[in-house]
Image (spheres, rainbow, N blue to C red):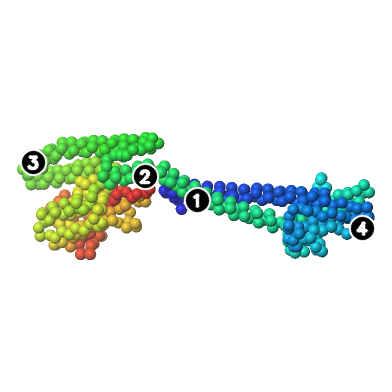
């Protein structure tokens, strides 16, 4: 799964790296300490071996004599794994010397092939004694007199001493590294959160812009983020100037065409009925076409702007209030959920689309029209689906005669009027479709639960926070 949070990514990477590094360091230090302990243990056995050699002599009768004192009580206690043995070599026979800890027991001795002597004529090997102790043996052979009589010297030490020492050290080491690791992760997390805090401030500032609470990125940003903030502010200013310029041009064009079209409509009234009706219908069609393309130009200039935001409830309430005054015999219901629902489009575009639908519904309704605005579910998408986009579902429903599927297709065509007895130009639904499409939304027509027409608009809501 891809992690989208920058803070989570950095924390995860530092946690993984710290954990791996501490584990490797712990294993490395433990291994080095084991090798050092084993080397020290072997040096101790070698020193004790030569202490035994210096303490033993051979008499005139060929008997071994001496009582090595190694300064370790374990050589005097039975079954400890700490022993020393002196055995005669050659043709002469005499009783061997053994430590009190060994008594009458024997130490297994491997062959020279299995454990050869080194260049100092010493050899070291591990065996198990009669008591089950795993012991390390240091062995050498020494000539004791001028007659060439020699003896084999062996000193053993219990390997469990080294294992216990290494185990104790490793336990303390791992505890210390674990404490250090946890402390380091906490410090790293605090440092990362503190270091990335300006990004949170920038994200919050963008959210305020998107919510319509601010028009620029405001805040005391560090120099690494300040150029980005300046560029975003410049982009917002440029976008605002483009929108204002487009609106001004649209207004100028509308104003320049308004008078000629009005003159044509007035002249049509004084012409003969057949010619006047033709001129009037064409002038009205021209008026609708001009308004449609002006809307397109204006919407294209500000579409996807972070500043395009309209609170649904107050805008829809104004429309319903106007419709109630114009249609006193029709009941208008309004439902907005949640109350603070916002649509990512200009207010005049929202009012024009919904206003056209309300006019159509009021024209054909018997007694009742309902307008609802809710947040669309996750399965509802606009013309261009986006994971970052919320969608708003606006529905206008009446209790009129409704439309059949083939009539719905005809109604969406520009300038098509299914009921010539009703006033209008036939451009309302096509204008609604064009405006909703420009905002990447869509218009759907169907039969409602009251039997009349249900017009459903899927429009973009305020962009989700993806931080």
Residue beneath label 4, please? 93
Q: Secondary structure at mark 2?
A: helix
Residue beneath label 2, please? 200
Q: Earlier in the sequence, mark 2 or mark 3?
A: 2
**Cα–Cα span, label 1 and label 3:** 87 Å
Q: Secondary structure at mark 1?
A: helix
Identified at 8% across, 42% down, the residue is: 266
Q: Nearer the viewer, mark 2 or mark 1?
A: 1
Left or right: 287, with 105 as reference point: left
Residue beneath label 1, please? 182
340 or 146, nearer to the observer: 146
Q: Quadrant of residue 129?
A: bottom right
Residue beneath label 3, please? 267
Identified at 32% across, 58% down, the residue is: 377
Q: Can the viewer see residue 415? A: no
Q: Nearer the viewer, mark 1 or mark 3?
A: 1
Circle 1 Cα neighbour tier, 10 Å, few/some/many (<14 / 14–19 / ≥20):
some
Q: Secondary structure at mark 3?
A: helix
357 or 302, nearer to the observer: 302
For residue 125, the mark is none
Circle 2 Cα neighbour tier, 10 Å, few/some/many (<14 / 14–19 / ≥20):
few
Residue 82: where, in percent of width, then height? 75, 57
Marks 2 and 3 in Cβ contact (< 8 Å): no
Q: Earlier in the sequence, mark 1 or mark 3?
A: 1
**Cα–Cα span, label 4 and label 2:** 91 Å
Circle 3 Cα neighbour tier, 10 Å, few/some/many (<14 / 14–19 / ≥20):
few
Q: Earlier in the sequence, mark 2 or mark 1?
A: 1
Left or right: 403, with 79 as reference point: left
Q: Nearer the viewer, mark 2 or mark 3?
A: 2
Residue 190: where, in percent of width, then height? 43, 46
Q: Earlier in the sequence, mark 4 or mark 2?
A: 4
Identified at 36% across, 36% down, the residue is: 226
């Amino acid at each position: 799964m891809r992690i989208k949070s920058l803070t989570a990514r950095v924390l995860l990477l530092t946690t993984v790296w710290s954990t791996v590094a501490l584990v490797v360091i712990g294993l490395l230090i433990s291994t080095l300490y084991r090798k050092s302990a084993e080397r020290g243990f072997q040096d101790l056995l070698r020193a004790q071996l030569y202490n035994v050699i210096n303490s033993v002599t051979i008499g005139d009768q060929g008997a071994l004599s001496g009582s090595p004192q190694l300064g370790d009580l374990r050589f005097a206690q039975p079954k400890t794994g700490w022993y020393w043995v002196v055995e005669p070599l050659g043709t002469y026979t005499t009783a061997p010397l053994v430590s009190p800890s060994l008594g009458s027991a024997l130490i297994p001795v491997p062959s020279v092939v299995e454990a050869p002597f080194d260049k100092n004529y010493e050899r070291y090997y591990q065996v198990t004694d009669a008591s089950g102790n795993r012991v390390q043996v240091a062995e050498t052979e020494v000539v004791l007199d001028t007659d060439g009589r020699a003896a084999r010297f062996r000193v053993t030490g219990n390997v469990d001493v080294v294992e216990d020492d290494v185990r104790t050290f490793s336990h303390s080491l791992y505890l210390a590294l674990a404490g250090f690791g946890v402390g380091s992760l906490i410090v790293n997390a605090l440092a990362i959160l503190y270091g990335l805090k300006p990004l949170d401030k920038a994200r919050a500032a963008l959210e305020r812009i998107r919510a319509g609470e601010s028009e620029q990125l405001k805040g005391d940003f560090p120099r690494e983020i300040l150029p980005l903030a300046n560029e975003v502010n410049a982009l917002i200013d440029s976008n605002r100037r483009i929108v204002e310029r487009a609106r001004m041009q649209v207004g100028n064009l509308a104003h320049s065409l308004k008078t000629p079209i009005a003159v044509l409509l007035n002249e049509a009234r004084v012409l003969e009925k057949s010619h006047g009706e033709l001129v009037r219908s064409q002038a009205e069609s021209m008026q609708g076409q001009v308004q449609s393309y002006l809307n397109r130009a204006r919407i294209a200039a500000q579409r996807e702007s972070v500043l395009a935001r309209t609170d649904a409830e107050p805008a829809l309430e104004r429309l319903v209030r106007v419709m109630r005054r114009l249609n006193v015999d029709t009941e208008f219901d309004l439902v907005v959920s949640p109350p603070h629902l916002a649509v990512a489009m200009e207010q005049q575009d929202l009012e024009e689309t919904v206003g056209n639908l309300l006019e159509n519904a009021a024209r054909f309704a018997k007694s009742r029209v309902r307008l609802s605005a809710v947040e669309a579910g996750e399965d509802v998408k606009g013309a261009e689906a986006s994971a970052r986009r919320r969608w708003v579902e606006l529905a206008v429903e009446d209790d009129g005669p409704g439309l059949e599927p083939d009539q719905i297709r005809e109604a969406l065509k520009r300038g098509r009027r299914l009921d010539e007895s009703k006033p209008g130009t036939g451009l309302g639904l096509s204008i609604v479709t064009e405006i909703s499409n420009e905002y990447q939304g869509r218009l759907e027509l169907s039969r409602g639960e009251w039997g009349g027409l249900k017009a459903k608009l899927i429009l973009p809501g305020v962009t989700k926070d993806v931080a």
